[in-house]
Amino acid sequence: MEISLREVSFAYKVGDRPLPVLESINVRVAPGDFLAITGSGGSGKSTLAMLMAGLLEPVAGRVILDGKPVRGRGKGKTHSAWHKVGMVFQQPEQQLFAETVADDVAFGPGNLGFTGSELETRVEEALRAVGLDPQKIGGHSPFRLSGGQQRRVAIAGVLAMDPEVLILDEPTAGLDPAGREQVLGVIRSFYRRPGKAVVLISHNMAEVAAMARQVIVLYQGRVALQGTPREIFRQGEALKTYGLIPPPLTRLMQELQRRGAPVSPEIFTLAEARAAILAWLGA
Ligand SMILES: Nc1ncnc2c1ncn2[C@@H]1O[C@H](COP(=O)(O)OP(=O)(O)O)[C@@H](O)[C@H]1O
Ligand SMILES: [Mg+2]
């Protein structure tokens, strides 16, 4: 599945006035892509995520799924292609509602028409994919789980619909470090499966650096920067203008270089930092 936004603009209606939020956005995600969308608060990240998931419709420009211009989800019956796009909202655990974990995860695939053992299999696989034991936890009330577990149940509910593109809006926000690592692990293993694509909304630069292949920086509703993590994070000054700072590792390397160490300021992974520091110390 390929999602393409061409010259998309969006405005919310406040009273009867339009509030412009996104302006002439071009984005494309295809199988194998891992796109991070970042930017300071209010830059339009969540709105863009909802446009990419068909939950909002542009006021200008086009949304194209696998080459076909489409309307939003639920508008007209011909565009069931949206089923292949899964959206994990910010704080998705707030939308848990069922009496048991299994029922909650079954809600989405149930709506897609799955029943019986096929539905059960999907629920079990989705729970396993997020590191929860369906036998142990399937019958529990979701409300008795920890915050991190609740969030994983909510993500399982989306995975159970077997999306090809997974869009996640700030999926680790508010979790403790262990919970954050677990959620990132779930996203990584989803992405490892053939034909999948991930769109990760995050303002955590360390997370973006560790996960994404491509990065878009939004600023006041426009695409301010676009490129690989390396291309983005070496622009420390530009990032600052857009209310962001490079990931801690990159800043450490930039600081070491400033103090005369022969290390590259474009490093953003632990492995690269380790190699650079060892080479420096060894020299
Ligand atoms: N439902 C809404 N109605 C009116 N304005 C909204 C609504 N949702 C978001 N906004 C406004 O749109 C802008 C972008 O919001 P959002 O997409 O949530 O940004 P981000 O996710 O980057 O913080 C902000 O100015 C925000 O106040
Ligand atoms: Mg947001």
Image (cartoon, helix red, strand yellow):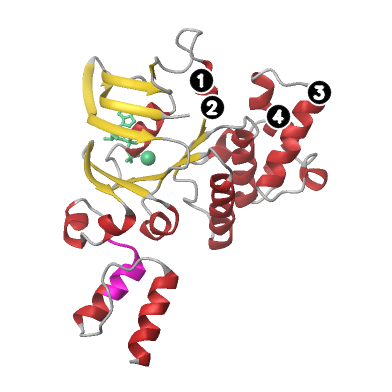
Cα distance in 3D space between marks 1 and 4: 20 Å
Q: Earlier in the sequence, mark 1 or mark 4?
A: 1
Which region shows up in magenta?
245-253
Image position, residue 148 (x, y; %): 60, 51
Q: Residue 116 carries which label?
A: 3
Image position, residue 104 (x, y; %): 69, 32
Cα distance in 3D space between marks 2 and 3: 21 Å
In contact (CB < 8 Å): disc 2 and disc 1: yes
Dot 4 corresponds to which residue? 106
Image position, residue 131 (x, y; %): 68, 51
Check the image and report above or below for 227 versus 62.
below
Q: Residue 84 carries which label?
A: 2
Q: Does the magenta stretch include residue 251?
A: yes
In contact (CB < 8 Å): disc 3 and disc 4: no
Give me the residue at 27% from left, 26% from top: 6
Looking at the rendered structure, the number of numbered marks drawn on it comes to: 4
In contact (CB < 8 Å): disc 2 and disc 4: no
Circle 3: residue type? Gly
Left or right of 41, for residue 86: right
